[in-house]
Image (cartoon, rainbow, N blue to C red):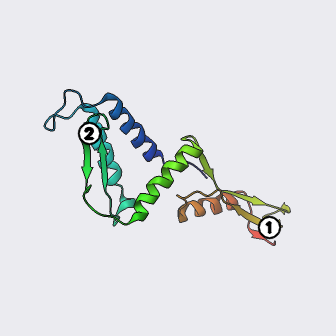
Amino acid sequence: MHRRLFPRAVALLALVATVATVGASGATAESPTPATIRLRATIDAILADDRLTGAQTSVVVVDTSTGETLYDRNGDRRLIPASNTKLLTSTAALGLLGSGHHFSTDVQATGARRAGLLSGSLYLRGGGDPTMLAADYDALAARVAAAGVRVVTG
């Protein structure tokens, strides 16, 4: 299994950077720029993701050159510090690993294979993928079965 690191977060950061570069010149609170409209729509789409059901979210985006608030959803809401820590951790991971980093989880085997029998051990080698789901493990098991392994003796 290979996954890109935080693809939606990378897109959001790129969009925020674009809006910051474009600025809000000529825009008013009543008539936001097209870039600001895209930023708002993108953040709204990310926050509407079903995986966030039940989560408490708060997002504020401010143009640092003008001080104008480009996006505010629950910005005055006090949330537990773990939310902020996750944001910093994600940013650090993106900076250290890069946007092209892929997490991988593989199945490896030792021993001989013959007629559906693996005379050895089967290992799951994880790479720290924080997005692994039960369905991903099922897919790995299906790959082992598709390779013809039916019994493991190790």
Picture coordinates of residue 140 (x, y %)?
63, 59
Q: CA distance from mark 2 to mark 1?
A: 60 Å
Please say if 27 is above or below 90.
Answer: above
Q: Secondary structure at mark 1?
A: loop
Please say if 78 is above or below 95.
Answer: below
Residue at the left extreme of this rendering = 30
Q: Earlier in the sequence, mark 2 or mark 1?
A: 2
- In front of the other: 13 or 123: 13
Mark 2 or mark 1, which is nearer to you?
A: 2
Which amino acid, mark 2?
Gly
Q: Which residue is label 2 attached to?
A: 67
Q: Which residue is label 1 attached to?
A: 121
* Crowd around label 1: few <14 · some 14–19 · many ≥20 (10 Å): few
- In front of the other: 146 or 27: 27
- Residue 76 badge: none
60 left or right of 82? left
Q: Secondary structure at mark 2?
A: loop
Which amino acid, mark 1?
Ser
92 left or right of 140? left
Picture coordinates of residue 37 (x, y %)?
25, 37
119 left or right of 54? right
Residue at the image point whose x is 26% and y is 61% from the top: 77
Please say if 142 is above or below 27.
Answer: below
- In front of the other: 6 or 114: 6
Residue at the image point whose x is 66% and y is 59% from the top: 126
